[in-house]
Image: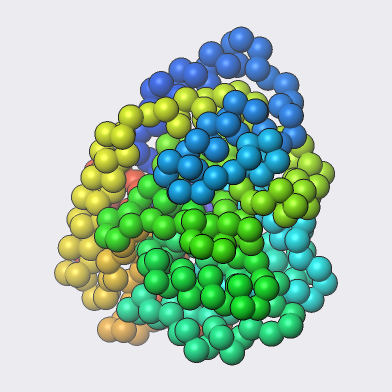
Amino acid sequence: MTRKAIKYDAINLSQGYPEYPTPDTIIEKANQAIQSGENQYSITWGDRRLREALADKFMEFNDVEYDPETEITITCGASESIMATMLGLLNDGDEVVLFQPFYENYVPSVRMASGRPIFTTIDKDMGIDFEEIKEMINKKTKMVFINTPHNPTGKVFSKEELKFFRDICVDNDILAVTDEMYEHIIFEGEHVSLASIDEMRERTITISGFSKAYAVSGWRVGYSAAPAEIMKSIRKAHDYMTVCSPTPFQSAAINALDLPSDYYSEMLDYYKKARDFVYDKLQRSELIPVIPDGAYYMMAYLDDIDMSDKEYADYLVKEKGVAVVPGSSFYSEGGEDMVRFCFSQKMEDLSEAMDRLLG
């Protein structure tokens, strides 16, 4: 859809890149790192200083303790962390429980590692089917994959829901992978890391990165944390895929972790205003939007529109000059009754996009 947005000169509300201003201090630090010669490979697992800073962050924000030497790895974005985790831990035919709608990289990562994705669905009311998930677990199940806050629905998994997965994992001796990329963008509820729940640290791989919270998606600095024995396998895959994340941007990421608390509150306020604005405008359209609790995406249903998701997305980009993502892009089967809007763009662009859509 980004290519179509360029072709039709449309406002791009499809791709999830943030237009919130990147903090000047970390841009300056990246420039300093380049000028001072930090332009060669870092150690494969990442700059030791960054891993130490992340260990402090995990303890203070996520309430989980990790050894920076053996249990934290810096990767080329969270997407590489996901791929390294699958390649490092899955064997042929291992099953991975995934929620749909899903972030587009999850399924290919599982399949490229010779795993088999098994799907359960988040419903329109952000509910999950506990009984269905219990029935899906079998001897081939290797892990469950949870994304909270969730892309594309904006669901924030509650502590009670995460305890259900704790019980599933412990009772069946399986692993959990959590993608927590949007952990700082929560409007309702609170962020809980699955690894912080009793008995889960030893069987959870936690993945996140700097792209969204600090508006540096092009820097490609992500990370994963896991117990040392699990991390050994992830690091083997990571080493042969990318060697290391970009060195000067790792240095700047250390500085990002030192930003004051008001940076996060101001960013959240910015996205909340954008969310509320888009939701209000979409309620005036033929679409039926669902307000998200976290992240910066909004699903909207096509119940009163006589088009499929792909037809409607093509109509919007060609006739209205607004690019969105067809819902079926996030499903193995289904999703033809919805589209996804991204509201991480500048307010003036969001305003123009809504004027076009409603005009």
Quick check: can you spot residue 39? yes
Quarter of the image containing the C terminus? bottom left
Instruction: Check the image and report above or below for 42 versus 318.
Output: above
Q: Who's the residue at 54% across and 37% down the image?
A: 54
Give the percent coordinates (x, y) of residue 273. 21, 50
Q: Classify residue 136 by image quadrant.
A: bottom right
Give the percent coordinates (x, y) of residue 300. 33, 71
Q: Who's the residue at 64% across and 51% down the image?
A: 226
Q: Who's the residue at 74% across and 80% down the image?
A: 140
Please indicate whether residue 14 sits to the left or right of residue 243 in the image: left
Q: Who's the residue at 58% across and 31% down the image?
A: 52
> How is the model colour-coded?
rainbow
User: How many numbered discs sit on the rendered protein?
Assistant: 0
Give the percent coordinates (x, y) of residue 34. 60, 16
Quick check: can you spot residue 347? no
Front-most of residues 225 and 26: 225
Please indicate whether residue 332 sits to the left or right of residue 327 in the image: right
Front-most of residues 288 and 307: 288
Q: Classify residue 268 by image quadrant.
A: top left
Instruction: Check the image and report above or below for 186 versus 165.
Output: above
Give the percent coordinates (x, y) of residue 185. 35, 50
Please indicate whether residue 281 sits to the left or right of residue 105 in the image: left
As drawn, the residue found furthest toward the top would be 36
Instruction: Check the image and report above or below for 20 versus 120.
Output: above
Please indicate whether residue 33 sits to the left or right of residue 287 in the image: right
Front-most of residues 182 and 11: 182
Q: Classify residue 339 by image quadrant.
A: bottom left
